[in-house]
Amino acid sequence: MDKFEKLTAIAAPLPLINVDTDMIIPKQFLRTIKRTGLGKNLFNDMRYDEQGREIPDFILNKPAYKKAQILVAGKNFGCGSSREHAPWALLDFGIRCVIAPSFADIFYNNCFKNGILPIALPQDQMDDLMKMAEKGKQITVDLAAQKVESFSFEIDGFRKHCLLNGLDDIGLTLEKADAIAAYEAGNRTEKSWMWGNA
């Protein structure tokens, strides 16, 4: 998982409330267990018409936002089913941070596990960031300082550590590789019968 430290990037405004995971990545694209290749179908039903052509008015189809790495969204972002494909699709498109007034719990947790920083901010601060995004301005997110522009945000210390260091569940386990190897070596001696050495 890539580290998330400080990001200054174009932010795409998506001022919709209750954006659910089926809107983020529709069900017909859930046949894969790969984390790559889903970005092209992110917001599929809003990005493309029935013939598969881009809808020019959708924000991520506008030239200024095609490389956006931050999404500024409405409240209750990521509601609906618990599909992990939703953060996979966002990340594969290039989105590293989603800022909204509130998130669905499962989506929020899945973001951290996949290297995306979800930030919840009060509505008045969201309004300012939305205006910046609508003007095509870059927004700076500093995880170490816990700041979005001049606004502070809260984050669990453990999750912050994982993002700053690029640690997913496997990475966290590998941090304990020496302790695991020492345990297994002792276990082979103490319980040799379990290892076929009796």
Image: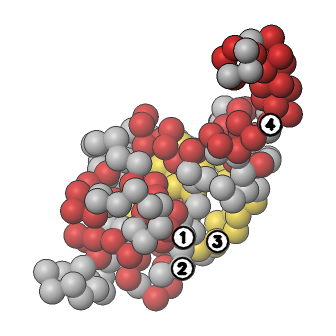
- Label 1 packing within 10 angstroms: few (<14), some (14-19), many (20+): some
In the figure, 59 relative to 180: above or below? Answer: below
- Label 4 packing within 10 angstroms: few (<14), some (14-19), many (20+): few
* Mark 3 to mark 1 CA distance (whole Å): 11 Å
Q: Earlier in the sequence, mark 3 or mark 1?
A: 3
Q: Which of marks 4 and 1 is nearer the N terminus?
A: 1
Residue at (83% x, 16% y) in the render: 189
**Image coloring type:** secondary structure
The disc placed on residue 177 is 4
Q: Is mark 1 on a helix, strand or loop?
A: loop
The answer to which image quadrant residue 186 occupies is top right
- Label 2 packing within 10 angstroms: few (<14), some (14-19), many (20+): some
Q: Which of marks 4 and 1 is in front?
A: 4
- Label 3 packing within 10 angstroms: few (<14), some (14-19), many (20+): some
* Mark 1 to mark 2 CA distance (whole Å): 7 Å
Residue at (52% x, 63% y) in the render: 91
Q: Position of residue 99 (x, y in %)?
A: 52, 53
Three-letter amino acid code of the residue under disc 2: Lys
Q: Quick check: 3 left or right of 119? A: right
* Mark 4 to mark 2 CA distance (whole Å): 38 Å
* Mark 4 to mark 3 CA distance (whole Å): 36 Å
The residue wearing badge 3 is 9
Q: Classify the position of the C terminus by image quarter.
A: top right
Three-letter amino acid code of the residue under disc 1: Gly
The answer to which image quadrant residue 177 occupies is top right
Q: Quick check: 192 left or right of 65? A: right
The residue wearing badge 2 is 67
Q: Quick check: 186 left or right of 77? A: right
Q: Which of marks 4 and 3 is nearer the N terminus?
A: 3
Q: Classify the position of the N terminus by image quarter.
A: bottom right
* Mark 4 to mark 1 CA distance (whole Å): 31 Å
The answer to which image quadrant residue 171 occupies is top right
